[in-house]
Structures are given as C-alpha cells and as structure tokens.
Amino acid sequence: MSSLDPVLLEILGNKFASVTEEMCLTLQRTGRTLYVKETADFACALAGLDGRFFAYPRSIGVSGFVGLECLPAIEAVIEVQGALEPGDVILTNDPYRSTGLATHLPDLHMIEPYFHEGEIVAYGWCFVHCSDVGGRVPSSISPVNTEIFQEGLRIPPVKLMRRGEMSPEVRLFLDANSRTPDANMGDIRAMLASLATGRRRVAQMLGQHGQAELTAAQEALMSYAAGKAEAVLRQMPEGRYSFSDYLDDDAASRLPVRLSVTVEIKDGSVHLDFTGTDPQVATAMNIPSCGRPHAWLTLRMLALVQTLDRSAPLNAGLLRPLSIHTPLGTLVNPEEPAATGVRHAAAIRVNDILNGAFGLALPDVLPAAASGTVIPIVMSEPKPAGGRMVQVIEPLIGGTGARRGHDGVDGRDSGISNLANNPVETVEAELGVEVLHYGLRPDSGGAGQWRGGCGMELSFRVLTDGSHVLGRGMERLLFRPWGQAGGQPGQPGSLVINEGHPREHRLGKIDVLEVKSGDIVTFRTPGAGGYGDPMQRAPEAVLADVEAGFVTADHARRAYGVALCDGQIDHEATAALRKGAATNAGTVFGPERDTWDGIFAPELMDRLNAALLALPLSRRQSRRREIFETVLADLPSSFPRLPASDTQRETAIRRLETCLSTI
C-alpha cells in the first residue's frame, strides 16, 4: 500500500473517476450513431503505465470492461512504429493482435498516452461499437461466420494519430472498408474528443497535485481495491464449486454448446478453471481471452465483490486475487483465426455459470439466472441515393434473476453492460420502421417466492423494401434461464414474422433476414429465473403482479396457486390449489435441460471434451459432430424439446459410451 494520506487518496480516486465519466459524456454527446448517442455501447477509462485501468466510470457506458489490458497493444505499436509521442493515438480492433483488448472487429479501441514534462504519466482509453467495418454482412456481425477474415477489416494496433495529425493512409483504409464510412468517422472523432477531455483533466490534476502524487495514487487505488476484494473472498466458504450451462446451439447445427467452470475459493483468493468447456466452435461465438483473466470471464466476480462491499473502488485491482485457467482451443480461449463476432452470447453464459458456481457457496446472496441474452437488433436498408443505412433498432435484453428477499428487475439487465434502450421516436426518425409494440412480456419471468424479471417484446413493421434484419446474440430459445432454490425457470425467447397472419413464420437464430415493406417482425426475449417455492409467494404480491401486468390471472392460478375472482384473491380456492402442491429444491433448469442431461450427463461431457481437446485442432469439430450425430441418430428431431423414450435414451447413452472409448 502507498503512504498517501487516505483522505487524499479518496479525493484523487473520486477525481479520476469523474474524469472518466466526463470522457464518456463527451463521447456520447458528440457521437454520430445510435450505438453511441442512445444505446451507449462505449466506454472510457484511465490506465496506468502497466496498461490496466485504475479509474473506470460506474454508471455510463459498458460496465464490463474493467479487466481489459492496454499494454500488449501499446507494446505492439512501439515495436513496429517506434516510441509514442505527444499527440499520438493508437487504434485497434483485432482481438488476436491486441491480445484480447478488442474482442470483436466492430469494437474500435483507442489509446492515447498522456505526457507530463516529456514522460508518460497515464493512458486514456476509449472504445465504441461502430456501425460497420465491412465483412460478409451489414454491421459485420453474423453468428455463422466461420473465421475472423469474414468479419470485416482487421486493424492491428497502429497509430491513427501522429503528433496530433490523423494518418491519411489509415483513414483511407477505414473509409474503404465500411458500408457506413461517414457514420464511423463521426464516432471516431467523438472518441478523439473524449481522449482530449481526459488529457486536459489529467493535466489539471497534475497542476493541482503534482506528478509524484498522481503516479502513486494509481497504484494505491489498485492495491486498495485488491485488499477490498481479498477481504470479501475471505468471508466466503472455502471450497470447490462446479457448474455448467449451455448455449442453445452453435448457429450452424442443432448441437448445444457447453460451458463449465470450477470455482476454488481459498485464503482470500479465487481460481476459475474452465476445464470441461466445449472446444472452440466453427462459428462466431468464441471469446478471445488469449488465456488471460479477461473481462468477459471475470465480470461476475467483480459484481459479487462490489455487491458485498459497495465501498470498493471500481478498477482492475479487484481482479488481483483472481487466477484463471482457460484450456487453449476451447470456446473461452480460441486459437486464431476463430470468429468472435458474437462473443457476447458466450460471455453472458459465462456470467451464468459463475453465478451458479458462486451461488453454491453463497446461496442466500446470488440470484437465479438472468434472461441470458442481449440482442442488438440491427436494420440495414437501402438509401435512396445508393448505399445502405445500418443502425441498431434496440439492444433487446430481458430481466434479472430473483434472489432471496427480492424479485428480479423487469426488462433491465446490466449484467454485462449498461446499454440503454433507444427512444422509439428516434428509431422511427432514422430508420424505415414503425414500432407497433415495445414493452414487458407478461408471464415470462420464472415463478418463485420471489419472481424472476420479465423479458421484453418488440414488434415493428418494415416500411422499406430490400431491408435486412439482423439479431445477433439470440439465445435462451431452447434452454431456459434456470430458477434457484425451487424457483421456476423463465420462459424461452422467440422470433416470429407476421404473427397471426397467413404468412406467419416462426424462426430460430437468424443470420441476415430479408424482409419487405409491410412485414411485421416480433422479437420476444426470455424471462429470468425465479427464486424459492412459488407456492410460498404472498398471494397479495401475486395480485399486485397481475394488476401491474407482469402476470396474467391464468398464470397466477397455474404457477402460483393463487385464484382471483373479480380482481380479488379467492382465499379459499387459493388454499385448495396450494394444498399438497409439489415443492422443489436447488436449481431448476427446466424440461429441455433435464432431458438433455438425461443422456449427456455432466461427467460424460467432461470426458468427451477432454478427449476432443487431445485431438488436433483441425479434427475436433468434425469428430464432435460425428459423435453427436451417432448418439442422436434415433432420437426425435425435436429432442430435447420433447423427451426420448426410455429405450431411445438407453440406446443413446450406450452409443455415447462407445464413442468415448474410441476417440
């Protein structure tokens, strides 16, 4: 720990945090696209000389990137282009060449060195999700891309600005490789403005406090946060806690994708071991962690520490008590050139498995599963003068999971970010759509003594022929957000075109959905898991949910055993409904997951993945597909939505055992 006066350290910590928040406000107010000025898919921070963030905003922008590291990208630029000078700004979007700073190509990251008397004293950092960086589809992100080369322009760490002047060569490459070059450049200039804001504010602090104090404060704030995290971990029961969950599929087949973690808590530290996670997929759901304690893999621990100690400062020091093991070649540590465009879908499921594992240690603290999805719904439509407009309609989410003593939050989940919804008026002004309905989805939250948060429903009419709709990150269409302590899982999501019309069409995950004028598109996101026995929920709370529109009267009767008559509780009928009702305990995954686990039990999946990872990378996906095709051969095509017969299940298990013995 530093010898800095604690009062001064608190003052400096708050000043640094306010600098990052002002950087974010500058970026949002000067941004060009809905991604920035409305959705707030961006972030800003201050990094120390080690490249780690010692100051990060709490309430604006993407909240999950505290654990990112800038130093590898900085060193890569210095190696090729020489030392950094005042006015230089680094740009990159390449997950592999930035060693995980960027995690998919539409995220543009910038780093500016802040100088004082000829020495770098800190770095300003920011990122935005930009509209389009080329690639196979509008907006650059598709779940079915098979390698990063299909996902758009790769920008290795390079100097965008040299001594305050933008590189014309870099500008040419950026403009030539995007469907929306003007919109991109508008957001890039907003990023530069935010970095300039940080530079000015840091210079003011240097004038007030001096370089020695500010440099010492950076490390002191990190050490202080680390001590807070260690203290929280020491309060937790020591032990090893394992949990697994699934993505519905890999977007190219009907085969679910497994993520697994073992959390070991010991002596004020925590180790995360992702052994048992599936090999990397040949689609775009891989998380490029580069084997590090990456932000996408550690966010749940940050949330836990800051929940149990709200005084802990938000910086990378919170991660110092953490170590991690991510087997190379798995979904959470893929080898280049794996596609990564929809990495957030897997990252959300990482949140879920960490939530489940930590929940085994602290069942009264951790909630049930959140809705488990973030769906940036993007519209691409032709412009009258040529070219295409690419904008986000809404970043659809669901709700948060219930926990002991508290219902989940309806229609909001900041588990991986603080993304905001776009105002309907703005969407309709900028895109050729008419929003017909945007609101909460009744009955979607899992029933429980404390109810899971409701999901969302968005329905819009397309007004322009030749339009495309993209909904990357669609998940929990099959495997439901699980309930906890006997709480029920949330309802799965869905996508319907022209619902209730003769041309109705129900879809699963989509790549690029071609639509025409008059088509009505309806997205429904999953509800979150409930907590505790639904029959223990106060009837008055159920009635209040019905009155508020979160629960229908029919669902109140079926799920909670609460009978309503003329808007009032029928206490006699309620007592009869609840008498002898079966109760559950522990985690309730839902019928689809139970059916799947009836054949693909966790211990068998651990063995399968260990054997697959022993194969050469080029053979893993094909061998995995062959095994599942063999095992599933005689099962219904609707499995696991519908269960297999006992004979079919026993045959499938024998086939799986045979395959495991011959890999």
Image: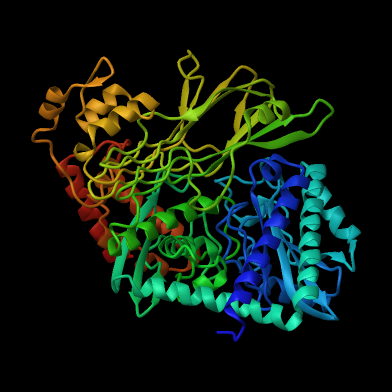
On the image, the x and y values in percent for residue 286 come to 52, 57
The residue lying at 20 percent from left, 23 percent from top is: 563
| Rendered-image quadrant of the C terminus | bottom left
The structure residue drawn at horizontal position 36% and vertical position 24%, both measured from the top left corner, is 547
Q: Position of residue 617 (x, y in %)?
A: 49, 66
The N terminus: image quadrant: bottom right
Counting labels gives 0
Observer-nearest residue: 133 or 219?
A: 219
Image spot of residue 57 (x, y percent): 62, 59
Q: Residue 481's quadrant in the figure?
A: top left
- Describe the colour scheme in one phrase: rainbow
Residue 26 visible within the image? yes
Residue visible at 77% across and 55% down in the picture: 191
- Residue 654: percent from left, percent from top: 20, 55
Which residue occupies 24% across, 54% down?
Answer: 655
| Relative to 621, 587 lies left or right | left
Left or right: where does residue 564 sit relative to residue 113?
left
* Relative to 654, 30 lies left or right: right
Find residue 48 and report its image quarter. bottom right
464, above or below 270, in the image: above
